[in-house]
Image (spheres, grey):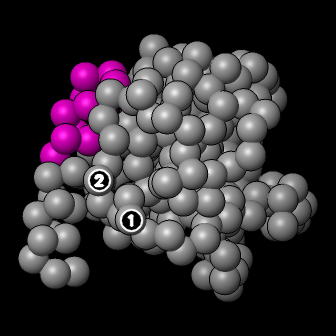
């Protein structure tokens, strides 16, 4: 990263931290598509995202973590063999785990499961490590609309509802796609979204 990027990066991280700590909602680049995010342990903040997206409460959202060890804090009895699987996938992969704990109840599915992705992208990892809590990630679009492939494609109606919009990577027009989604059940993989 060059000096200007580093200043922008750090400024964005600080503003995101302020927003997340106050229960606000951010628009930020992830390891996949641009995401709408908040503190994944704050039920009121999570409800704001459902309202912004006009998303039914029955449709869950993804939670991002920065490190494998963080998984142990938010999944009861996590099967550590999942890390071997994740080490061998090429595409960012979200895993649905049973036994969600310590997260906003509106994020947890009726069966007690939760979708979590451990991110490798610099901005997300840095932000989550500094925040010391997981962050929600859901695509930056209204429910039912197509996922925006870049920041420029995000609807102004969505952008205007954010408490903070990250500037870092706004000009990046590299096409992005959502993560793969799999369900992990004692070593058995079920692919939900390739």
Label 2 residue SS: loop
Q: Nearer the viewer, residue 169 or 14?
A: 169
Quarter where residue 120 is shown: bottom left
Residue 171 location (% of width, % of height): 38, 65
Q: Which residues are magenta?
A: 14-25
Residue positioned 75% across, 38% down in the render: 145
Residue 111's label in the rendered image is none
Would you call the spot at circle 2 few (<14 residues within 10 Å), some (14-19), or many (20 or more)? some
Quadrant of the snapshot with the N terminus: bottom left
Can residue 89 be seen here?
Answer: yes
Residue placed under numbered mark 1 in the picture? 171
Residue positioned 17% across, 60% down in the render: 8
Residue 110 location (% of width, % of height): 78, 24
Residue positioned 67% across, 64% down in the render: 177
Quadrant of the snapshot with the C terminus: bottom right
Residue placed under numbered mark 2 in the picture? 167
Residue 65 location (% of width, % of height): 46, 54
Q: Is residue 126 magenta?
A: no
Q: Is residue 137 left or right of residue 90?
A: left
Q: So how many labels did they put on this image?
A: 2
Q: Is residue 19 magenta?
A: yes
Above or below residue 88? Residue 91 is above
Q: Is residue 62 left or right of residue 45?
A: right
Quarter where residue 149 is shown: bottom right
Q: Is residue 115 left or right of residue 157?
A: right
Would you call the spot at circle 1 few (<14 residues within 10 Å), some (14-19), or many (20 or more)? few
Q: Nearer the viewer, residue 108 or 102?
A: 108
Instruction: Please identify, in this view, whether the residue under mark 2 or under mark 1 is nearer the observer.
Output: 1
Helix, strand or loop: magenta stretch:
helix
Label 1 residue SS: loop
Q: Nearer the viewer, residue 151 or 103?
A: 151
Tell me whether circle 2 and circle 1 mark residues in contact (CB < 8 Å). no
């Amino acid at each position: 990263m060059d000096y200007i990027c580093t200043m922008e990066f750090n400024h964005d991280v600080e503003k995101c931290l302020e927003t997340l700590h106050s229960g606000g909602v951010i628009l930020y680049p992830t390891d996949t598509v641009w995401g709408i995010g908040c503190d994944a342990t704050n039920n009121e903040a999570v409800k704001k995202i459902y309202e912004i997206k006009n998303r039914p409460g029955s449709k869950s959202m993804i939670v991002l973590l920065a490190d494998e060890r963080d998984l142990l804090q938010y999944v009861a009895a996590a099967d550590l063999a999942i890390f071997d699987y994740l080490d061998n996938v090429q595409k960012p992969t979200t895993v649905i785990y049973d036994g969600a704990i310590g997260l906003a109840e509106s994020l947890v599915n009726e069966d007690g499961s939760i979708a979590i992705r451990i991110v490798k992208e610099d901005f997300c990892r840095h932000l989550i490590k500094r925040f010391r809590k997981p962050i929600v990630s859901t695509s930056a679009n209204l429910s039912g609309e197509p996922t925006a492939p870049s920041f420029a494609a995000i609807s102004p109606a969505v952008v205007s509802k954010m408490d903070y919009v990250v500037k870092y990577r706004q000009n990046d027009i590299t096409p992005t796609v959502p993560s793969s989604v799999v369900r992990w059940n004692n070593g058995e993989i079920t692919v939900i979204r390739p």
